[in-house]
């Protein structure tokens, strides 16, 4: 029977020296021979009936030896993990060691194993978090009704230059350093000329243009441009053509207007109540999102956890691949993308470390809470998730299950994570922020 010796390298890595007796290895060789020889074709012998010496004389011993060593090592490694109560977070790095002097026929392996760190889980329920108010102000309801009026407006052509609030039909193509970028062009697009709807400079450049006019408009993407980080801080030049200019003719805000959105006997008060209810649901969703973010931040601040480097590197690898994919979609070579940011790939990768460490720490805390509270993905949870995916993609649930089968573990982890977040938020103390009083 194999034995193992544990050596702690640091809080997230151990070394296991695994010793496998020669008898175990020989039995594994015999099992490997029986498996491999089932399909061996040697004249004078039926498949599976070839003596081992004759098989080895014809095919050699390498295949038997490799299969036997893999089998005994896998079994011994799993036993070592169980014996030492270890929970690896990545595949171990294994190397064979010289056999011991007192048992030269035995084999020894050294497995370097990254493990989840031990840490004391602090208080995680009853956390006080500040969330946005759930109440909807009357002014916000009226503003939403005005937006509905604009959506339902008739567009009336006018013979004058573009002004703020107009609806203009535009062609435009944006370029950065003379190169077009993804999402930077449109043809025949009806566009509301309003501040805040576009990047700074775009609307200012269009105001004053007349139908039939074409000109270049310079605009700069914000430094923190979350929609497309690759464009952040970049100056773009848009070639803009105005085809026509219209003004919105707003309908009256009355019962007749309300009936456009509800029952034939709906009133304006009904519409106003419906708008308020929708806004309250939106506020509750936003409140929960804020609460989730605050709970996680408080938990991260309350715990000092040594992070397995292999998990941090894995997160950084994922971030780099995503950045590469975004650059590719934008038609930018990876080297050009790095050059634009003035960074080497090593420097770019280093900038990703803080975010990667943050995500790894979050995952470790959530896993610890899930274990402490025995939060699991039930069959009903998995079935509900598969049903949701089937509805989303318009496919039978059986097809979704078959597609997800290789990644079912990831699906289960996602469900457990979601249930754990719900558990933490439901048991937090949410205090609504106080809106500044009007004066």
Image (spheres, rainbow, N blue to C red):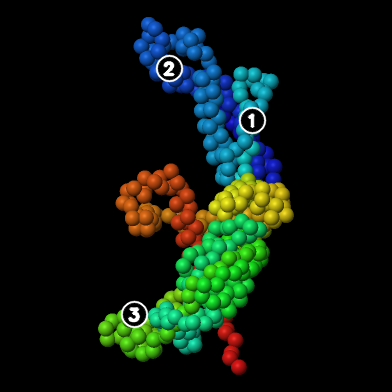
3D distance between C-alphas at marks 2 and 3? 75 Å
User: Who's the residue at 43% across and 10% down the image?
Assistant: 51
Task: Please say whether residue 191 is visible from this viewpoint.
Answer: no
Res 251 → quadrant:
bottom left
* Label 1: which secondary element: strand
**Residue labelled with disc 2:** 37
3D distance between C-alphas at marks 1 and 2? 28 Å
Q: Is residue 279 above or below residue 239?
A: below
**Percent from the top left, x then y, of residue 56?**
50, 12
Q: Nearer the viewer, mark 1 or mark 3?
A: 3
Q: Is residue 370 above or below residue 168?
A: above
First in sequence: mark 2 vs mark 3: 2
**Residue labelled with disc 3:** 261
**Residue labelled with disc 1:** 95
User: Who's the residue at 51% across and 28% down the image?
Assistant: 71
First in sequence: mark 1 vs mark 2: 2
Q: Mark 1, residues whose alpha carbon is within 10 Å: few (<14), some, or many (≥20)? A: few
Task: Please say whether residue 10 is visible from this viewpoint.
Answer: yes
Say the numbered circle drawn on residue 43: none
First in sequence: mark 1 vs mark 3: 1
Res 252 → quadrant:
bottom left
Q: Is residue 337 above or below residue 2?
A: below
3D distance between C-alphas at marks 1 and 3? 70 Å
Q: Nearer the viewer, mark 2 or mark 3?
A: 3
Q: Quadrant of the N terminus?
A: top right
Answer with left or right where residue 58 lies relative to residue 313: left
* Label 3: which secondary element: loop
Q: In the displayed image of the protein, which residue is found farthest to the left?
A: 264
Pick the residue in front: 147 or 413. 147
Pick the residue in front: 4 or 293. 293
**Percent from the top left, x then y, of residue 123?**
59, 65
Pick the residue in front: 39 or 278. 278
């Amino acid at each position: 029977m194999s034995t193992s010796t544990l050596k702690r390298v640091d809080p997230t890595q151990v070394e296991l020296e695994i010793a496998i007796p020669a008898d175990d290895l020989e039995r594994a060789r015999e099992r490997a021979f029986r498996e491999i020889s089932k399909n061996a074709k040697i004249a004078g012998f039926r498949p599976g009936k070839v003596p081992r010496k004759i098989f080895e004389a014809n095919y050699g011993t390498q295949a038997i030896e490799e299969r036997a060593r893999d089998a005994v090592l896998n079994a011994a490694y799993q036993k070592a993990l169980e014996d030492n109560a270890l929970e690896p977070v990545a595949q171990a790095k294994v190397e064979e060691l010289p056999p011991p002097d007192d048992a030269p026929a035995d084999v020894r392996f050294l497995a370097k194993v990254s493990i989840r760190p031990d840490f004391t889980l602090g208080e995680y329920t009853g956390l006080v978090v500040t969330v946005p108010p759930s109440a909807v102000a009357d002014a916000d309801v009226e503003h939403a009704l005005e937006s509905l009026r604009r959506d339902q407006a008739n567009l009336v052509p006018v013979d004058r230059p573009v002004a703020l609030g107009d609806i203009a039909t535009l062609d435009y193509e944006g370029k950065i350093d003379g190169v077009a970028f993804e999402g930077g062009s449109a043809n025949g697009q009806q566009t509301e000329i309003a501040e805040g709807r576009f990047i700074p400079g775009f609307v200012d450049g269009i105001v004053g243009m007349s139908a039939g006019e074409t000109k270049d408009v310079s605009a700069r993407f914000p430094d923190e441009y979350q929609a497309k980080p690759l464009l952040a801080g970049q100056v773009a030049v848009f070639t803009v053509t105005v085809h026509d200019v219209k003004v919105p003719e707003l309908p009256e805000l009355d019962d007749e207007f309300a009936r456009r959105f509800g029952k034939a006997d709906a009133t304006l008060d009904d519409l106003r109540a419906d708008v308020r209810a929708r806004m309250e649901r939106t506020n509750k969703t936003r409140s929960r999102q804020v609460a989730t973010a605050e709970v996680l931040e408080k938990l991260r601040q309350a715990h000092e956890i040594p992070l397995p480097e292999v998990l941090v590197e894995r997160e950084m690898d994922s971030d780099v691949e995503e950045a590469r994919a975004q650059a590719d979609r934008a038609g930018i070579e990876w080297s050009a993308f790095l050059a634009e940011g003035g960074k080497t790939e090593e420097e770019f990768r280093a900038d990703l470390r803080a975010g990667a460490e943050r995500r790894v720490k979050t995952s470790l805390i959530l896993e610890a809470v899930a274990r402490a509270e025995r939060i699991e993905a039930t069959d009903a949870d998995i079935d509900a998730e598969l049903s949701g995916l089937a509805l989303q993609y318009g496919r039978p649930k059986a097809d979704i299950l078959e597609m997800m089968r290789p990644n079912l573990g990831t699906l289960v982890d996602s469900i457990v994570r979601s249930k754990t977040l719900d558990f933490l938020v439901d048991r937090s103390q949410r205090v609504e922020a106080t809106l500044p009083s009007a004066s």
